[in-house]
Image (cartoon, helix red, strand yellow):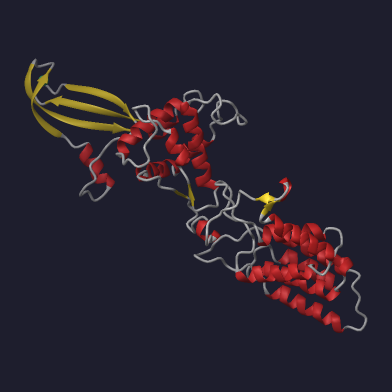
Amino acid sequence: KVCLVHERDHARYPPKCNAASDFPALFRWVVDEIKRCPSREFRRMDSILDADHKKISPMRPQQPQQQNFEVDWYLVGLIKVETKILSLVNDASVLAAPGMAEFLHMLFDRLAFNLPVTNERGPPSSSCCRSPQTREATLALLKTLCGSTENVSALCHLMLGCHYDLSSEGIPRKDLLHEWRVDPNEKRKSVTGFVGMKNQGATCYLNSLLQQFFLIPALRQGILSCRPVGGLDSDEGKDEGLYETMLRNLQRLFGNLLLSERRSYDTKDLVKSIHGYDGQSLRPGEQQDVDEFFGLFCDRLETALKPTPQKDILKDVFGGKISHMITCQECKNVSERVEDSLAISVDVQGKASILESLQLYIQKEHIQGYNCDKCQAKRDAVKRCCVSF
Ligand SMILES: [Zn+2]
């Protein structure tokens, strides 16, 4: 019956159900009661342990709810049940049973000590146990597992692996973050769910523009769906032109903004791969006008996208026509000049909203001394812009 109860609770409480602390607590009490039972027998305890492992293994790291992580009480409960049963059985052969070594490894690596490494793309640390309560429970279980010499040896091996690269004669690991006072929570994605971009000096103009690009779904998907010219497996830099490198770095940025678990993404490579009109890489310490940069970046991006099916994406997303019209007040003849445009510049200072700015942009303007083609004379005229996007 005890086994049955344990099996049923999984169906009732899905992983991460934080209201589920009572059930494992009650179950531990039931297990305690078995101790007092005169006819106690542990024949099926291994099936409980097995079921417990199956529940703990798919646990995923808690996502921050507010500034703090909520305690995953269900995980705490499962770990405590496991600890309780193992200490009750108190048998080295159960502790060293098949599957226990894998469980120990999973417990150590994924639940407790997933170390922050220097790799920019991965999460700073994806340990499932982020609250003091889950960590305390996990450490107690690790200690209980050390009731067998096999597990002590396995644990020592795992602990050494935190410091040394055991695959190559134990040289110190180079992939670890060697910063003092590292708090993975500080490096983890903000609770807003958005990933930031590092400022390379004075690159805020670039960051703000590219964040806007990223937040336009059609543009983001278009950029991300481009295949690298040399195929996905091609070596970076090899057979790759200037523009392809820039496109690839832009894809990397968007991919990270979308999926990274880190607080921010380093745009160093991207900034380096964008070349100005002078043919030089952007200088990170130099402030630029964002409107000018928009022009430059769209020009570079259009070139990079030319060989891809996404070649028209900038036109599709931003493209429009601006018509400059001048109407002669005498003969009412309209002279019109239409130009393609990806952006329009409007005055924003002192304006209540963007609509007011746009209103001003298309406002009629009276001009004098306009050379009318039809009248063949200087006339008063009305000049205005029309926009179609
Ligand atoms: Zn005229």
Q: Is residue 93 left or right of residue 140?
A: right
Q: How many marks?
A: 0
Q: Is residue 94 above or below residue 175?
A: below
In the displayed structure, 183 sits above or below 29; it is above
* Residue 176 visible in the snapshot: yes
Q: Is residue 1 visible?
A: no
Expressed as whole percent of the image width and height from the top left, the position of residue 329 reads 10, 26
Image x and y of residue 260, in percent: 54, 49
For this rendering, which residue is in front, 27 or 105? 105
Q: Tell me the quarter of the picture where residue 102 sits.
A: bottom right
Q: Quadrant of the N terminus?
A: bottom right
Q: Position of residue 307 (x, y in %)?
A: 50, 23
Q: Nearer the viewer, residue 301 or 154?
A: 154
Query: Does residue 129 appear left or right of residue 326 in this picture?
Result: right
In the picture shown, does residue 167 fall above or below 98? above
User: Whole-percent x and y of residue 235?
Assistant: 59, 30
Quarter of the render that holds ligand 1: top left
Q: Residue furthest right?
A: 39
Please determine whether, in this image, residue 388 is positioned above or below residue 349: above
Judging depth in this view, the residue of 288 and 383 nearest the camera is 288
Name which quarter of the figure residue 225 lies in. Answer: top right
Tell me the residue at 25%/40% (across/down): 346
Q: Quadrant of the C terminus?
A: top left
User: Which residue is located at x 19 percent, y 37 percent?
Assistant: 363
